[in-house]
């Protein structure tokens, strides 16, 4: 409060200042308590994140190592590339702009090349 030179008696302290301090104190206590709880959970998550990341990477590695067995497993990329080429031919015959079917042809050859390198 501004210093007006007037003395404030005990009534001001008892009826205005003390309840105001109590309200402000409870408000800040509630705000701090409610904002600290998520921070504590965030710190706990950051503390456990290396373990979670490690488990996730192990799972991904094990799923990549497991290869599916079947007669089409080795040639699935080539089948996809042929499908792209057929799609490009249909689009070229249907008067679709050349950039669309040309892009499909480039993607098909890229898929075929990657499949050829992999096997």
Image (cartoon, helix red, strand yellow):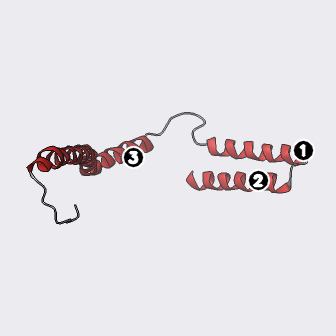
- Viewer-closest of 33 and 4: 4
Where in the figure is residue 27, as x and y percent of width and height?
24, 45
Extreme residue toward the front, this view: 6
Where in the figure is residue 40, as x and y percent of width and height?
23, 47
Q: Which mark, residue 94?
A: 1
Looking at the image, residue 37 sits to the left or right of residue 110; the answer is left
Q: Are there few (<14), some (14-19), or many (20+) residues within 10 Å of tag 2?
A: many
Q: Which mark, residue 68?
A: none
**Measured Cα–Cα span from mark 1 to mark 3:** 44 Å
Q: Is residue 76 above or below residue 98?
A: above
Instruction: Read off the residue under disc 3.
Output: 61
- Viewer-closest of 67 and 42: 42
Q: Are there few (<14), some (14-19), or many (20+) residues within 10 Å of tag 3?
A: few
Q: Residue at x 42, y 41 (%)?
A: 63
Q: Is residue 41 above or below residue 105?
A: above
- Viewer-closest of 14 and 58: 14
* 2 or 1: mark nearer the eye: 1
Q: Earlier in the sequence, mark 2 or mark 1?
A: 1
Rendered image quadrant of residue 1: bottom left
Instruction: Read off the residue under disc 2.
Output: 105
Looking at the image, residue 46 sits to the left or right of residue 92; the answer is left
Q: Earlier in the sequence, mark 1 or mark 3?
A: 3
Where in the figure is residue 6, as x and y percent of width and height?
16, 62
Q: Residue at x 28, y 48 (%)?
A: 42
């Amino acid at each position: 409060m501004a210093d007006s030179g007037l003395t404030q008696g005990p009534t001001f302290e008892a009826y205005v200042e003390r309840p105001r301090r109590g309200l402000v104190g409870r408000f800040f206590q509630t705000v701090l308590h409610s904002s600290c709880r998520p921070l504590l959970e965030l710190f706990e998550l950051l503390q456990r994140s290396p373990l979670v990341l490690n488990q996730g990477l192990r799972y991904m590695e094990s799923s990549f190592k497991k290869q599916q067995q079947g007669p089409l497993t080795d040639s699935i990329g080539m089948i996809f590339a042929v499908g792209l080429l057929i799609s490009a031919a249909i689009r070229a015959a249907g008067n679709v702009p050349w950039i669309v079917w040309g892009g499909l042809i480039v993607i098909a050859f890229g898929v075929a090349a990657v499949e050829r390198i992999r096997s």
